[in-house]
Image (tube, rainbow, N blue to C red):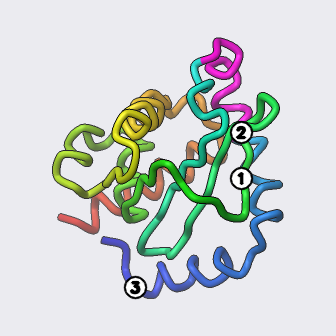
Amino acid sequence: MPTAWLLSLVKMPLNLTPVRMQALAMEPLLERVFRERMADGDLDFLRGEVIEIAITDLALHWFITLEEGRLRLISRGKPAVTVAGGVREFLLLASRREDPDTLFFERRLTVEGDTELGLLVKNLLDGIELDELPLPLRRAVDLGASWVAASSR
């Protein structure tokens, strides 16, 4: 588990950053990672729906929807489904250092709300390959995952 001082160091600026500013960074990243899936219609199930990604130990809540063919980070919404877990679990998921199904079955990552939509979101997250991420983010995820894996031993 990441140490409390590191989480608090990251948590404060993230929580003070307005959603619009977060969206300026997140939306191009979402566009890049999901471009092919959006073109193929694989994300059409998100049209008109709001999903919440909650990183619980950072008190961070991202509300994402599909509007006009683009993934948007919105300030709030009533989520149809919420995927929640700690930063450690999301890093392990993104880096493929832990089996996604294990994280969900052990309830280290949880899905609440519309079960069918939750399964589609889980499969979407599960389908992200590390090499699809921009190199700086890929390195940050790998470094963070290495650190949390080492700190849990």
Snapshot quadrant of residue 133: top right
Q: Quadrant of the C terminus?
A: bottom left
**Main secondary structure found in the magenta portion:** helix
* Residue 94 to residue 150: above or below: above
Q: Which mark is residue 4?
A: 3
Q: Which mark is residue 135?
A: none
Find out whether residue 81 is within the magenta segment: no
Tell me which label, 3 or 1, sits earlier in the chain. Answer: 3
Q: Position of residue 89 (x, y in %)?
A: 35, 56
Q: Are marks 1 and 2 in contact (CB under 8 Å)?
A: yes
Q: Which mark is residue 71?
A: 2
Q: For the residue marked with disc 1, what is the amino acid?
A: Leu
The kind of secondary structure element at disc 1 is strand
The kind of secondary structure element at disc 3 is helix
Tell me where the magenta segment starts and ends, as one range. Answer: 30-41
Q: Position of residue 43 (x, y in %)?
A: 60, 26
